[in-house]
Structures are given as structure tokens and as C-alpha cells.
Amino acid sequence: MVLRGLAKTFRDGAREIPAVAGVAFEVFDQEFVAIVGPSGCGKSTILNMIGGLVAPSAGAIELDGRPVAGTPPGVGYVFQKDTVFPWRTVARNIGLGLEYRGVAEAERERRVREAVRLAGLEGFEEAFPATLSGGMRQRVALLRTLVVDPEILLMDEPFGALDTHTKIGLHAELLNLWEARHQTVVFVTHDLSEAITLADRIVVMTRRPGRVKLVHAVGLPRPRDVIKLRESEAYGREYGQLWHVLGEEFA
């Protein structure tokens, strides 16, 4: 996937507000890319343009060499809010996308069971969201998207509202799920540690109107142990290099 000179301007009455300008970078097949930057720099706007939820004011998105208008095929979206349905059980929430696509019941149940096993949710299949923690509900929302096997997974600060302990646990689970499936992922976050832990490459944005300041290849091997990783000298070097670049946007 290639973003070529993407720009987006919103209107507030007679006033035009530029959100992003001249955004250009590539996302390779099966790559995990994170976008970081100051609040209001247009990170979510970029994700929404990729997902077809917002039309760009200028520029283009290409997938496999062809321009894309609207929502590209095979895209899954995970939002910051967990968006689970309170009247459906864990299993029925996870299986919703498969149900919508008309997948046969036996196959649907098999795929839901496998997702539940991979995410360590055994025993909660018949639980309702009101009985779950915030982290577990977000896990259900993530599985609901992953179980339909999207080619491209867009994630908009999915762990932003969670405490640090829960977030680190979900980082480990997301990496395990990604290692098993290797979807292409574009992940928006304001948390530099999160970006370094998860991503192959990190796109650093400037202040609004957001522009690409740096595309950084994360020099940490996979698979990654999210606890040991943060204790390593290599992680510290990555953080220091990126914080120097990102910190300039807060000066």
C-alpha cells in the first residue's frame, strides 16, 4: 500500500482547517507499521483515509499498484472504544463478522474456538461484556476483527484507555496473534513505547498540519518478549533516537 501526497482539510463554517498535508509513505505486505505524533497531528485522519471513512482532499492511496477510492477490500478496523455489543456473549461477539458474511455455523464455531484459544479466553465464551474488564472487552473486539482474516488491519489507539499492566499484556497477545497470521497492520498510537514494542517501522508525524517527519525502521528482532524487550539496551537506544525526533514537536 502506498500513500501519495495525502492531504485533508476540514471546514468549520467559513474557516478551513488543514489536518494533514503531503503525507507519503509505503506499507509493505505483512508489515506492522505504527504512526506516532503529537495530539491533533492527524494520525487518526490518515487511518480514516486509508480505511475509506474519510475522503482525502488531495493525494491518492494505491493498493497493489491501483488507486483506491472508498474502503479497500479486505480491511478490518479496531477502534479505541471496544465497540462490543452488550446483548451478545463473547463467542457471539467474536463471530459477528463471520455471521454477517454467511459463514456456515460449523466453520464459524471452529474459527471462534480457535480465536478464543489463541487469546486465552477459554471459559468466557458465554459471558456478557458487562461482566468483563476493559482489557477483556478490547480483546473481544480485536478477535472479532481478526477472525474474518482481513488482509489489512487498521488499529486506532486500541489500547489507549487501558492501564499500563493491561496494555502490556495485550501487546503480548497482539504480537502472538500477528505472528500467527501476519496481516498488514497500520497502528495509530500516542505511546512511543507501544510503537517500538509492536512495529517493524514507525512513521513520526509533525504538529498540525501533520506531515511525515521520519520513517524509522525498528532494529529489534522478532519474536519479541514484551517484558524483556523493555529491559534491553537496544530498546533504550530505539526509544532515545525516536524521542529526540518526536520531542522536537513538543518544544
Image: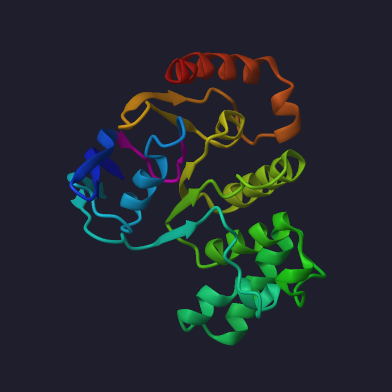
Q: Where is residue 152 in the image (x, y as percent from the top left)?
A: 42, 54
Pick the front one: 103 or 174: 174
Pick the front one: 55 or 100: 55
Pick the front one: 239 or 128: 128
Query: What colour scheme does the image use?
Result: rainbow
Residue 94, above or below 154: below
The question of residue 29 being in magenta is answered with yes
Q: Is 99 situated left or right of 84 in this image?
A: left
Q: Position of residue 185 (x, y in %)?
A: 47, 47
Residue at 27%, 34% (x, y): give it. 24
Location of the N terminus by quadrant is top left
Residue at 69%, 43% (x, y): give it. 167
Seen as rendered, the residue at the extreme right is: 123
Q: Is 86 situated left or right of 54 in this image?
A: right
Quadrant in which residue 91 is drawn = bottom right
The question of residue 217 being in magenta is answered with no
Residue 17, above or below 66: above
Provide the residue span drawn in magenta.
Answer: 25-35
Number of callouts in the render? 0
Q: Is residue 7 visible?
A: no
Residue 176, above or below 91: above
Q: Is residue 237 visible?
A: yes
Quadrant in which residue 210 is drawn = top left
Q: Where is residue 188 in the image (x, y as percent from the top left)?
A: 48, 42
